[in-house]
Each structure stands twice: as C-alpha cells, then as structure tokens.
Amino acid sequence: MSEEQRSGIGVFEKYLTLWVLLCMAAGILIGKFSSAIPDFLESLEVAGINMPIAILIWLMIYPMMMKVDFKSVMNVRKHPKAILISTGSTWGIKPFLMFGLATLFLAFIFKPLIPADLAQDFITGAVILGVAPCTAMVFVWSALTKGDPAYTLVQVSINDIIILILFIPLVQLLLGINNVAVPWDTLAFSVVLFVVVPLAAGVATRILMIRKKGIEYFNRKFVPKFGGITSVGLLLTLILIFSFQGDVIVEQPLFVLLIAVPLILQNIISWSLTYGLCIWTRQPHRIAAPVSLIAASDFFELAVAVAIALFGPGSPVVLVCTVGVLTEVPVMLLLVKIVNRTRKRFPQDVGEDMETRA
C-alpha cells in the first residue's frame, strides 16, 4: 500500500487539478453551446445569493465542519509556540502578503497585459482567497507528512473560531486600501450563510452522532460517507462557475496563467516563513509539518462562496478563486514532499502525540 493510500489521500484529492481542468472544459463547452443553461441558473437568486451554487457549496462545507471539535481547543496549551506561529502567520501575515503579491504582479508587473479595471477585480479575488484559511484539505496534508492529527484538529478549530471574528474586517480593510467598496451586510450575510450555518450543523451532527454511536464510529464510518458528496459538490460548482466564465477564459486564456503567479508565490512564501520559524524555535517535525502547511493553504470553498455572494458567479473576482483551486493542490503536494525530505532538520520527537478526544 502506498504512502498516499495509508495517509488517506484518495484519487479525487491526488488528481484534483486534473478534475478542475476537466470541469473547466465542461463548463466552457456548456457556456458556449448551451448558454441558456447558465443563464437560467444564474437567474435563480434569493437575496442576491445564487441558490444552485449555494446548495452545492453547503454540500462541500458541511462535511468539513463535522470534523471541527471545539473541545480540542482546550489542548492549545500543549504547543503554545506552534499555535502562535501558525495563527500569527495565517492571520497576521498571509492576507497582507497575498494583497501585496497580487497588487505587485497584477497591477504593476503585468500591467501591459491586464486592463486596470480587470486587474482590480483580480486583486479583489486574491484578497478574498488569501484571507480564508484552509480547513478540510489540511487534514490530508498533515496525514501525508505524519503530522500530529490532534494538533491539526486544534489549529483548524481555532481558525474556524477566528474566521467568525476577523474574516469580515480583514476583507474590508484590504479591499478598502484598493478602493473597492464591499457592503458590510452582504459580506456578513455570506459569512453567516457559508460559515456559521454549516459550522453549527456540523458541530451539532458531531455531538449527536458521537453520543449515539461513539467517536470511533463517527471518525471511521460516519464522516467518510460524506467524502463523495463533498467531491461531487465541488466538481459541479466548478462546472457552473466555468460555464459563467467561459467567454473570458476562451478569449484571454493568458489571464489564468497571470492570476496563478501571485497565488502560487503566496503559498510558497507563507510556507517558507512558517516552516523556517518552526525550525528556529525547534518544533518537532510532527508539529512543524501541519503548522506550515496550514499557513500555506487557503479555504477556497469559502472564498468562492463569498466572491459569488458579493460579485456574482460571472465576475472576474470569482475566476481568481477558482484558479486558486486549480493551483493549490499541485503546489501543496510539492510542499508535502519537501516537508518529508527535510525531516532530519528537526529535533527527534520525544513522547507521544497529543491524544485526539471527542
């Protein structure tokens, strides 16, 4: 059995970039030859929210939120430096780094290639993507590097709490610097709709199922049942988005490559800074691996949902978030390989991992 199979990464996660490319092709073909379909779906809005996409995003996010265990936050004291490094990087560095890189490349270096108004839209999408910290895929990256699963759970739970507090003000701050006005009520409504509601449903499901069947059944039997639903939700969402974005991609395929540059650099630089801090502070490898990979990755499902709620599914802002889906997986798999190959740089782990508790 391969390392990837033992770690729990499936065919879907391993080849996510391929699936995204196939969804891009399918969506573009639908938009070009059956334009009535995306036109009809785009018209299905309630309070400015596209309902078909909203339902699909709920299907993606709800299973992720079932993994969140707020009781685990009590274990924060076991690795305070690691928590500080990861949280500080995720919320104090990464959003501003993304804003800086997107502005540098999309508004200045690539200025001859991108119209000014479009560059501003692309920067807006990058900001929304950079402010949203990763949740679900982090468990995969942590497993592939033999990271401490209990620490990973603690950090993800902390980030999910912080999202409720900092996501809105950070998005407004960074977009305000770029003179992009974002309605506070619409932004707040999208966070409630795509974070609070699925988080509450996921936590409630977790508590009820553990009481009824136990933690072992919940982790090994119940949660895996939703893996396919999450995958289908993501793929159908991407097909819909690319059906709305088809004209832009066909007419200007270079835009996808240009957008990818700051997104990839943000992943790599965020990881490098955090991994270096872990080496400097002598964190054990099983902790340093998830710390750095959490800091490097993005919650692209939330970014797509918020971008659609604020600007509509056909907006260039949404295109940036979907490019983030396209680029992140191969970059993160590369970083996983580097993390595994540099294991000897860290002090030998002593003692047992933090215990995962319900």
Image (tube, helix red, strand yellow):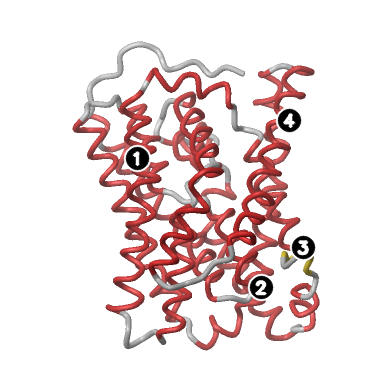
Mark 2 vs mark 3, foreground winner is 3
* Circle 3: element type: helix
Residue at image mark 2: 26
Q: Marks 4 and 1, how far apart in space?
A: 29 Å
Q: Earlier in the sequence, mark 2 or mark 1?
A: 2
Q: Marks 2 and 1, how far apart in space?
A: 40 Å
What residue do we see at 75% from left, 17% from top?
Answer: 211
Position above or below: 142 against 48 = above
Position above or below: 82 against 192 = above
Nearer to us in this view, 97 or 182: 182
Residue at image mark 4: 204
Residue at image mark 1: 88
The amino acid beneath tag 1 is: Gly
* Circle 1: element type: helix
Q: Earlier in the sequence, mark 2 or mark 3?
A: 2
Q: Give the quadrant of residue 280.
A: top left
Q: Earlier in the sequence, mark 3 or mark 1?
A: 3
Q: Position of residue 193 (x, y in %)?
A: 69, 51
Position above or below: 137 against 112 = above
Marks 4 and 1 close (CB-CB < 8 Å): no
Residue at image mark 3: 51
Mark 2 vs mark 1, foreground winner is 1
Q: Marks 2 and 3, how far apart in space?
A: 21 Å
What residue do we see at 25% from left, 19% from top?
Answer: 348
In this rendering, would 172 be left or right of 232? left
* Circle 4: element type: helix
The amino acid beneath tag 4 is: Ala
